């Protein structure tokens, strides 16, 4: 196998090894086999075109064209001409698939199911990276910069997935890159007629020169690149599962084990409330006579870091046949058991299961896992609610105001976990909470006063178009402007309750919906809602409703208690969608799955109360990373080109008499180019001896460097004019002496200019122009030959 063919094989292998970091993102991982096959075809086309040979730009163009045709054959065969030639319909279909993949990325948690859109994004991304690596490492014979796209591929994947196997993907990507560097070094040195290894000590070669230089350079490049590869993933956002956009996060299978981790599900809640069309998300039937408290809860947000409320990372397990008694619920609290049958819309792909709270039993098909703290169910490995029907047995808990007022302190562990507030929370939040609840005898009275402050007497207005801001000051801004929607009210009340020592969290789900003529209840996009849950020992997690004109105010908060004005609280309508508020709240949200999930892009839901948007699609991160790397690397191309050229010219070749002319002229050209970089423009009309004298005079060189220049000029004249050119020893060392002397005499600005923007880099443009001229001449000659009729041939 030739050196270039071996390099082609190694570049494809390095790309595939780096692509293994994407394996944890999607299940099943069968896409990697298809990507490997298409990558092999892409590399094969590059090998064939280089063997012809075609010009480098034509080689890259041929590979890109074949890559596009392969993707068309796999993903848009029915829309393409002859099954593989892309046309308008094929491009449209590919665009639709990419859009679908974008939606799936925002909808599903890691690992996401292998939909056609995600498969196109994965395979297409690997092929694009593979083309970049092959172009740099093989076509342009520069393996070191080829590590940049490999680094981007690994870093993005590692930043998104994480996990205990991240070290393995790093080792694979690093091994692929180092293998590529060594393959290029071996191929380059083999062309010089020497094996990759240092020269014997007996030859008197200094360890800092000769063949040791490429080894040392390779080590430095490898160390820097691997260091960047370790650091970059730390700065990338993680992709968890969306919730309000149809994404959850379930990992693990079988019995026990596994964890659940999700980003803030309220990213798109405001958009759900503002949609023009109130699409039905689900319908349900229940044997409960009163549905005003039938909130359909999706998940609870119990982790508050001052910037966002989000679900905590917790262990999940198999769904139990019967759920345990809700934590904190005492035997003396009145309760009744009801059955509810829920039917989700065909388009509503929610990974978290909407259910009344608290649930006692769930009868459902598919792959689901149970999170015991929040008493929620989450889809496992792509399972969602699309078109699903399921039955839920749940409790209607009816505590009295007296039971809540007499609730003892919860356990220290529970209180410690659910009353934590970050130091970044503005002091005005706690101060307002103390002011509003002044005179309260217990936590229950404090909670009712907080609810009344937001819903009745605090002067707050419900408005889904408000822009409150983000970060730790968002709640303070909301308390000042007094405008917002359910996200702001629930976040603010839960935060203020925690400052008072009341365990609190935020629940996300739907209000009860609207009754239908057939006796069922219809839940639409505009029923998306968030509300606070406060914990009272003996009762458990208890719903409160601080958002004006939304949902229903619980009866246990409407009884007169000492210091409470809650008796005047009006009872809003059962369904928020039936009687929208004056603000755009009446409109709902984007598609249902987005409504409370995280599928729709939100401008204010999380932004207002400071939720974090961790759902940036991986392909966007990849694009941003590549763009950043390009912005970094493009200005450095002249410097990298000169460094590589200097290494080649002064390398370990030219150690035999046959190589004397090429080696001597190369070292001399390096000296004249270095002088040019420092402002001494070469004069091609001068003899080597006069050119050397000119460099000494204009470069202000001292004796040692002056003698080195003249020795090199004499060597050039010897190989040009002697009948039998012979090799002159020490040319590389003389060239380095001259280079060091020119740099020492130059100003700091001149040295920086010579390093970053070397004037001699213009030779690249000259070479390209000469190549194009020669190519045009050859094509013209070939065309003239084809058109010329052979002599003696009759028409």
Image: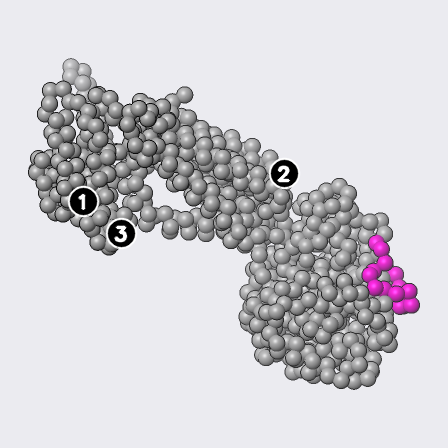
Look at the numbered discs 3 and 2 and tell me whether their residues touch, using CB distance below 8 Å.
no
Is residue 675 in view? yes
Residue drawn at x 54%, y 33% is 34
Please provide the residue range marked out in magenta.
Answer: 323-337
Q: Earlier in the sequence, mark 1 or mark 2?
A: 2
Q: Earlier in the sequence, mark 1 or mark 3?
A: 1
Viewport quadrant of the N terminus: top left
Instruction: Please indicate whether residue 210 sits to the left or right of residue 291 in the image.
Output: left
* Alpha carbon separation for disc pair 1 and 2: 58 Å
Please determine whether, in this image, residue 570 is positioned above or below residue 756: below
Colour setting: one colour
Query: Label 2 neighbourhood size at 10 Å, few (<14), some (14-19), many (20+)?
Result: some
Q: Which residue is mark 1?
A: 676
Q: Position of residue 234 (x, y in %)?
A: 53, 51
Q: Position of residue 148 (x, y in %)?
A: 42, 43
| Image quadrant where residue 429 sits | bottom right
Residue drawn at x 63%, y 50% is 109
Asked if residue 324 is among those painted magenta in the image, a careful observer would answer yes
- Residue 28 marker: 2
The residue nearer to you, when weighing 648 against 513, is 648
At mark 2, the secondary structure is: loop
């Amino acid at each position: 196998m030739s050196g270039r063919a071996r390099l082609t094989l190694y570049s494809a292998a390095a790309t595939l090894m780096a692509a293994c970091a994407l394996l944890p993102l999607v299940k099943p991982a069968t896409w990697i086999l298809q990507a490997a096959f298409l990558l092999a075809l892409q590399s094969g086309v590059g090998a064939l075109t280089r063997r012809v040979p075609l010009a480098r730009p034509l080689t890259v163009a041929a590979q890109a064209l074949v890559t596009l045709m392969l993707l068309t054959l796999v993903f848009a065969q029915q829309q393409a001409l002859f099954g593989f030639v892309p046309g308008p319909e094929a491009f449209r279909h590919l665009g639709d698939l990419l859009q679908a993949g974008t939606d799936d990325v925002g909808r599903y948690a890691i690992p996401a199911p292998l939909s056609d859109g995600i498969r196109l994004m994965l395979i297409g991304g690997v092929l694009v990276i593979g083309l970049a690596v092959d172009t740099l490492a093989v076509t342009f014979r520069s393996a070191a910069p080829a590590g940049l796209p490999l680094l981007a591929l690994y870093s993005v994947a590692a930043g998104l997935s994480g996990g205990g196997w991240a070290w393995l993907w790093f080792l694979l990507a690093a091994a692929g890159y180092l293998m590529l560097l060594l393959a290029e070094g071996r191929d380059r040195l083999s062309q010089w007629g020497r094996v990759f290894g240092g020269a014997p000590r007996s030859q008197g070669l200094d360890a800092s020169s000769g063949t040791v230089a490429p080894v040392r350079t390779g080590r430095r490049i490898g160390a820097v690149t691997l260091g960047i590869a370790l650091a970059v993933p730390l700065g990338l956002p993680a992709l968890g599962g969306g919730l309000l956009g149809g994404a959850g996060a379930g990992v693990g299978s079988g019995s026990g084990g596994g964890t659940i981790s999700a980003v803030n599900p309220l990213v798109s809640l405001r958009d759900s409330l503002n949609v023009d069309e109130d699409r039905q998300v689900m319908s349900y039937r229940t044997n409960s006579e009163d549905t005003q408290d039938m909130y359909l809860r999706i998940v609870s947000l119990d982790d508050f870091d001052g910037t966002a409320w989000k679900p905590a990372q917790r262990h999940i397990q198999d769904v139990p046949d019967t759920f345990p008694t809700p934590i904190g619920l005492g035997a003396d609290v009145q309760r009744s058991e009801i059955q509810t049958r829920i039917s989700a819309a065909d388009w509503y792909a929610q990974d978290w299961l909407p259910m009344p709270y608290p649930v006692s039993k769930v009868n459902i098909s598919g792959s689901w896992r149970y999170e015991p703290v929040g008493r929620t169910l989450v889809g496992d490995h792509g399972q969602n609610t699309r078109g699903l029907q399921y039955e839920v047995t749940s409790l209607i808990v009816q505590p009295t105001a007296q039971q809540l007022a007499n609730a003892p302190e919860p356990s220290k562990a529970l209180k410690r976990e659910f009353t934590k507030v970050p130091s970044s929370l503005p002091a005005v939040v706690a101060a307002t909470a103390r002011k509003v609840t002044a005179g309260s005898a217990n936590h229950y009275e404090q909670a009712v006063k907080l609810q009344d402050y937001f819903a009745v007497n605090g002067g707050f207005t419900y408005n889904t178009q408000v822009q409150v801001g983000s970060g730790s000051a968002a709640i303070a801004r909301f308390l000042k402007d007094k405008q917002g929607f359910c996200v702001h009210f629930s976040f603010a009340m839960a935060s203020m309750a925690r400052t008072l020592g009341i365990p609190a969290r935020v629940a996300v789900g739907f209000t009860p919906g609207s009754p239908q003529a057939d006796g069922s209840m219809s839940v639409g996009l505009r029923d998306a809602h968030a509300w606070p849950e406060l914990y009272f020992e003996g009762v458990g997690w208890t719903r409160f409703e601080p958002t004006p004109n939304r949902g229903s105010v619980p009866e246990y908060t409407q009884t007169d208690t000492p210091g409470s004005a809650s008796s005047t609280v009006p009872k809003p309508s059962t369904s928020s969608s039936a009687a929208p508020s004056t603000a755009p709240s009446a409109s709902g949200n984007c598609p249902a799955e987005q409504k409370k999930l995280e599928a729709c892009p939100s401008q204010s839901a999380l932004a207002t109360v400071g939720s974090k948007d961790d759902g940036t699609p991986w392909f966007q991160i990849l694009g941003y990373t590549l763009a950043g790397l390009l912005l970094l690397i493009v200005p450095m191309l002249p410097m990298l080109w000169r460094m590589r050229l200097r290494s080649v010219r002064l390398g370990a070749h030219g150690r035999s008499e046959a190589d004397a002319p090429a080696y001597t002229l190369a070292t001399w050209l390096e000296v004249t180019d270095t002088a040019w970089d420092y402002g001494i423009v070469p004069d091609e009309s001068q003899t080597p001896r006069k050119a050397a004298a000119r460099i000494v005079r204009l470069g202000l060189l001292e004796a040692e460097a002056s003698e080195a220049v003249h020795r090199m000029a004499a060597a050039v004249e010897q190989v040009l004019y002697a009948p039998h050119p012979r090799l002159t020893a020490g040319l590389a060392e003389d060239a380095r002496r001259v280079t060091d002397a020119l740099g020492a005499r130059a100003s700091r600005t001149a040295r920086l200019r010579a390093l970053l923007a070397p004037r001699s880099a213009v030779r690249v443009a000259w070479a390209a122009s000469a190549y194009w001229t020669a190519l045009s001449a050859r094509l013209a000659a070939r065309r003239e030959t084809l058109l010329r009729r052979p002599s003696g041939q009759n028409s």
